[in-house]
Amino acid sequence: MIRRIQSFFTKQKISQLFLISSELIVVLFLWANFRVLTVSHAFVSGDFNELPKVKVGIVPGTIRYLSSGQPNLYFSYRIDAAAELYRSGKISHLLISGDNGTKGYNEPQDMKNALMEKGIPAAAITLDYAGFDTYDSMIRAREVFGQDRYIVISQEFQNERAVYIARRFGIEAYGFNAKDVKNYGGIRTKLRESLARVKAFVEVQLGVQPTYLGEKIRIK
């Protein structure tokens, strides 16, 4: 029996299996990234005049300061864009969706504080402490906070992925692009985003449930 197995798994057959697997992975990578772009491109813009008026804008959470102690420009630019969209009248409420998974790490509260520093009233801000990733944030916006129409406020690359996820679940989502950060990460950042799109594509196809849903908190 062992000899039969060994004879089946010859070096040539192993090489063929490896080649087929590699090709399938490349196809998945390319197709997932293509689908994210094709589904989202018509609904994402850096000009709020091109976006509809909706009730809620969603700001995905991120850290306020880098490990070096320097301000995180992704954070700063998202806050600027959220304040701009709110003042434009395109939205009347902001949902901050981020990670508060450990003590002392509170993305939503940090972003709320920054928005209030910009003059946004506390009553116009709701916090989602279980937005552990973009996928969870988009689904929770509807299932927990009762929103099936919203504008995501982040950098273009994340907006494209967020809008793709939302629209594949029948949510009328748009994206308002915050200023991008050119000097962070470079190729590494692009590769990470490409892989994140593969993950999002697979999760959408499988209909994965968010990490946590919990009690409904309707934004009225």
Image: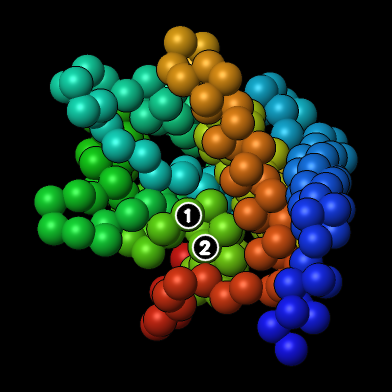
Q: Crowding near pointer 2: few (<14 within 10 Å), some, many (20+)? A: many
Circles 2, 1 touching at the beta carbon (< 8 Å): yes
Toward the bottom, the furthest residue is 1
Toward the top, the furthest residue is 183
Looking at the image, which is closer to me, 109 or 50?
A: 109
Looking at the image, which is closer to me, 67 or 51?
A: 67
Looking at the image, which is closer to me, 197 or 85?
A: 197
- The residue positioned 33% from the left and 54% from the top of the image is 99
Q: Amino acid at mark 2?
A: Asp
Count of numbered circles on the image? 2
Q: Is residue 150 left or right of residue 83?
A: right
Q: Is residue 111 above or below residue 179?
A: below
Which residue does the numbered mark 1 point to in the structure image? 133
Which residue does the numbered mark 2 point to in the structure image? 136
Q: Is residue 143 above or below residue 74?
A: below
Q: Is residue 75 above or below residue 212?
A: above
- The residue positioned 65% from the left and 55% from the top of the image is 200
Q: Position of residue 77 (x, y in %)?
A: 43, 23
Q: Position of residue 82 (x, y in %)?
A: 47, 33
Residue 78 numbered tag: none
- The residue positioned 60% from the left and 27% from the top of the image is 190
Image quarter for residue 116? Answer: top left
Q: Position of residue 51 (x, y in %)?
A: 73, 35
The way the protein has been coloured in the rendering is rainbow
Q: Amino acid at mark 1?
A: Asp
Q: Position of residue 154 (x, y in %)?
A: 53, 34
- The residue positioned 63% from the left and 54% from the top of the image is 199
